[in-house]
Amino acid sequence: MVSTAPKSTEKLVDTEGTVRLTVAQATIRFLANQYVERDGTRTKFFAGCFGIFGHGNVAGLGQALLQDEIDAAGASKEPGLKYVLGRNEQAMVHSAAAYARQKDRLQAWAVTASVGPGSTNMLTGAALATINRLPVLLLPADTFATRVSSPVLQELELPSSGDVTVNDAFKPLSRYFDRVWRPEQLPAALLGAMRVLTDPVETGAATVSIPQDVQAEAHDWPESLFAERIWHVARPLPERSVIARAAEIIASARKPLIVAGGGVHYSGAEEALAALCEQTGIPVAESQAGKGSLRFDHPQSVGAIGSTGTTAANALASEADVVIGIGTRYSDFTSASRTAFNNPEVRFVNINVASLDAVKQGGVSVIADAREAIEALSTALDGYRVGDEYRSKVTELAAEWEDTVSAVYAAEDGTPLNQNQVIGLVNTLSEPRDVVVCAAGSMPGDLHKMWRTRDRKGYHVEYGYSCMGYEIAGGIGVKMADPDRDVFIMVGDGSYLMMATELVTAVQEGIKVIPVLVQNHGFASIGGLSESLGSQRFGTSYRYRSPDGRLDGDTLPVDLAANAASLGADVIAVTTAAEFTDAVKVAKAAERTTVIHVETDPLIYAPDSQSWWDVPVSEVSTLESTQTAYDRYADWKKVQRPLINPSDRSKEIPQ
Ligand SMILES: Cc1ncc(C[n+]2csc(CCOP(=O)(O)OP(=O)(O)O)c2C)c(N)n1
Ligand SMILES: [Mg+2]
């Protein structure tokens, strides 16, 4: 335990092939030597390590990162693990997750946090990464293994259990969890984390919790622990008999529909998908994570599906006789809470690398890499094409929706903008390769419906967790992953107030992003939802408390433009379309992060999806608004497909 380590790591290799390093130094050196390989291309897996130091990691992992940086500078090399100081631990995990998504999960970040609150601040990020199946390595610090000075500052100290610490809260949120009580456990923990992080089925947050005394403890490691390791990212092949069965079902379809999810992107299956739908004429609808699987103007593209879908995709979904899910989790937004696929005879073919997703909605499960499965299906479907009538219907419905979008995109000059027009302006003024980023509020749904995606990585809306506060942190992660693209971050005032802190990190790192800050004085999204559910927008706008005790006074004198400027960003406040257009030009030409601040009316909505989302309404109430909403809710519940016995339900969509 008592450190007898020499001062310089250069002298540490002894004749027996061991190297004496602390657990923290060994961790950093190991991580710097991990690579992934897919389709013959090799990539260094860890781009770096985000961190905020405190007791628990400052003298362990902090010292190891310092030594790595200084040693690299001495050798005129890049550090093994570049260190980036963030402002909030949750935000750092979001940046890491966004980076991994933009890199199609072939690169990731480690995130180190201090013991206690620093570490538990990462829990929300862990959940987001795991739900979105994005690789992030979390290194929360833990309380003493020796317990000699327990309870240490910020220790949980449960009377009922000696080995539970706050970090146990990471267990249900992580796809891999280990705690390194002894140095000898470290190799197994790190190899276990790497296995999960690089596995397309398993990936998500991997957490290696290291007590602070163990981090600083020296150990003789086998040199081979630090050899370059290459992790193959698999493309599991579909079974031949399953493809034959899937092709048979699809070939019998008169109104098939593909639902493309995030798996299409992660597998790099966009071209294969385009080829399949050009060959067969099958239209493609997209989930939030799958948006951009086809360009918006591809003849077979019908855009977003589900609760925030286009009328085109939802009309086709409601009649489809075969639905082919590719890389989708079938979240409630995608399936419109199991009301989207309304044909009583509908059958499903689900292609997914994860059996968890492949079995959803029933039907044939093709457990395989998306690209491999699509290519196999293309061959098996040789000669199959949808009928001309169906093709014309697809074209007609898609064109109708595009007209609807064009109409609401159009802004009258000289008048204040609404959110549809703001989205339209960003879409038309950005370049096809630029990226739009969003996560929570009314904008994710509006973007899903209306954003015209022109590049496979041009649309980045986190909607697995829809986490307020992801926007700016996530946008920074996207920009770090893809510095050649401009990144437009669509952020509502609510999300901004929850976590704008990483603007400071962007300034520190010279990272330029373009946040479009939409000020509507509260929650347009939840306000609208509340109203539709009979709850009268209660508690959803940012107002003074009025003398009668309700939160419905004047709007608050909050100046978010000044707030953003105070964090070091350039800020342009605009009102009209002409001002917005000029601001985008300035922001695109700028080298610094430039926030565009615009006020909008929260009562102007995007065009309707003609769809539903299951949010239960109070069954009994003294409020008429709630009673009316409950009746409507009960009508929709009749349309919802049960998990089994789908035959005894209403097929009438409430008007
Ligand atoms: C961390 C977190 N807390 C709460 C919610 C629930 N929620 C979803 S949207 C929203 C309001 C977002 O407000 P704002 O960013 O201003 O967007 P707007 O609704 O006005 O478009 C809330 C509270 C959430 N998604 N994430
Ligand atoms: Mg708002």
Image (spheres, helix red, strand yellow):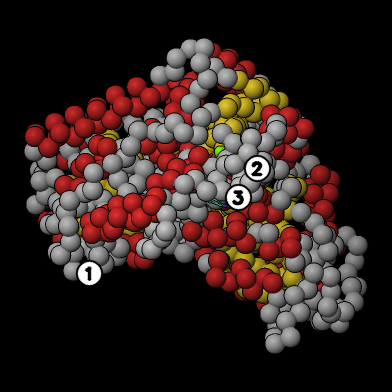
Identify the residue at horizontal 76%, vertical 79% (top origin): 157
Nearer the observer: mark 3 or 2; the answer is 2
Label whose residue precedes the other's in the sequence (1 or 3): 3
Identify the residue at horizontal 39%, vertical 46% (top origin): 532
Q: Which residue is mark 3?
A: 94
Residue 252 lies, in percent from the top left, at 9, 52
How far apart marks 2 and 1 lie (CA) works out to 50 Å
Q: Say few, some or many: other residues with alpha carbon within 10 Å of mark 2 (under 14 / 14 to 19 / 20 or more).
A: few
Q: Which disc number belongs to residue 546?
A: 2
Left or right: 569, with 67 as reference point? left
Q: Are marks 2 and 1 in contact (CB under 8 Å)?
A: no
**Figure quadrant of the N terminus:** bottom right
How far apart marks 3 and 2 lie (CA) works out to 37 Å
Give the structural element (helix, strand or loop) at label 1: loop
Which amino acid is tagged 2? Answer: Ser
Identify the residue at horizontal 66%, vertical 27% (top origin): 594
Most distant residue in the front direction: 548
Label whose residue precedes the other's in the sequence (2 or 1): 2
Q: Which disc number belongs to residue 644?
A: 1
Between 431 and 641, the one lying in front of the other is 641
Left or right: 435, with 363 as reference point? right
Residue 98 visible in the picture:
no
Identify the residue at horizontal 21%, vertical 36% (top origin): 278
Q: Is mark 1 within 8 Å of ligand 1?
A: no
Left or right: 594, with 580 as reference point? right
Which amino acid is tagged 1? Answer: Ile
Q: Are marks 3 and 2 in contact (CB under 8 Å)?
A: no
